[in-house]
Amino acid sequence: MKKILQIVLTFGTAWLIYYGVEQYRLKEMSEILQEIEVVSPERFNKLSIIQYPEQQNYVSFDYDEVQATFRALKKLEVKEAKRLKESENYTKIRLLEDGSHQFVEYYFYDNDSIQFVEEGLVAFRSVTYQVDEAELHTVLDSLLAGKTFD
C-alpha cells in the first residue's frame, strides 16, 4: 500500500510540475503574440465606420484621417477581458489597405466591451477588452464628430 501511495504521489507531483510549466509557457507565448503586429498599419488607406442596428456607414480614403483614427484607437486605455459582452447597439470601425485582405477592426459595444480583430495574410488575432465608459464615449465622439453617415 505504501508503494502504491508513493507511485501515485510521484506521478501526481510530476504531472503538476509539467502542467505548471506548460501553463507558464502558454502565458508567455500569448504575451508574445499580443505584441506581434499582424498587419502594417502605415499601409492603411481606407476607413469604414458602421453603426448598428441602423447600419449607417461612413467611408473615407483620406490617408491622414485613417492614420489619425488608428493612432486615436491605439491610445485607448484598455484592459483585457475574459468574455465579450455583445449587444445590439455597436459601432464597427475598420481600417484597411484598399484592395488587400489585411485589416484591423474595432467593435465598440454600448456596454463598454471592445472586440479587437486583426487579420493579415498569414495570421488572425481577436482580443476582447473592457474600457472605461467615459473614455470610450470621449474617443468615439471625437472620431465620429463631423462625419456624414449614409
Image (spheres, helix red, strand yellow):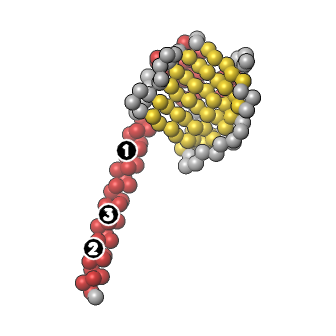
Of the two numbered discs 1 and 2 on the same chain, state the one appearing first in sequence.
Answer: 2
Left/right of residue 3 with respect to residue 79 in the rendered view = left
From the top left corner, tell me how far across and down residue 95 is, in percent.
Answer: 55, 23
Badge 2 amino acid: Thr
Neighbours of disc 3 within 10 Å: few (<14), some (14-19), many (20+) = few
- Rendering quarter of residue 90: top right
In the picture as drawn, the residue positioned furthest to the left comes out as: 3
Task: Give the residue displayed 54% in from the left and 44% down from the top.
Answer: 80
Dot 3: what SS? helix
Quick one: SS at disc 2? helix
Residue that label 2 marks: 10
Instruction: Identify which residue is drawn at 31% across, 61% down.
Output: 18
Q: Amino acid at mark 1?
A: Met
What numbered label is drawn on residue 124?
A: none
* Separation of residues labelled 1 and 2 (CA atoms): 29 Å
Q: Residues within 10 Å of mark 1 (few under 14, many from 20)?
A: few
- Observer able to see residue 136: no
Query: Do the numbered discs 3 and 1 sit on residues whose CB atoms are within 8 Å?
Result: no
Picture quarter containing residue 106? top right
Residue that appears at 60% across and 42% down: 130
Picture disc at residue 29: 1
Which residue is disc 3 drawn over?
A: 17
Residue 53: % across, % down: 73, 32
> Between 75 and 3, which is closer to the camera in this rendering?
3
In contact (CB < 8 Å): disc 1 and disc 2: no
Inspect this view and state whether residue 81 appears. Answer: yes
In the image, residue 103 sits, relative to residue 136, either above or below, namely above
Mark 2 Cα within 10 Å, few/some/many (few <14, many 20+)? few
Type of amino acid under label 3: Ile
Does 36 sit above or below residue 128? above
124 vs 9: above or below: above
Percent x, y for residue 138? 69, 30
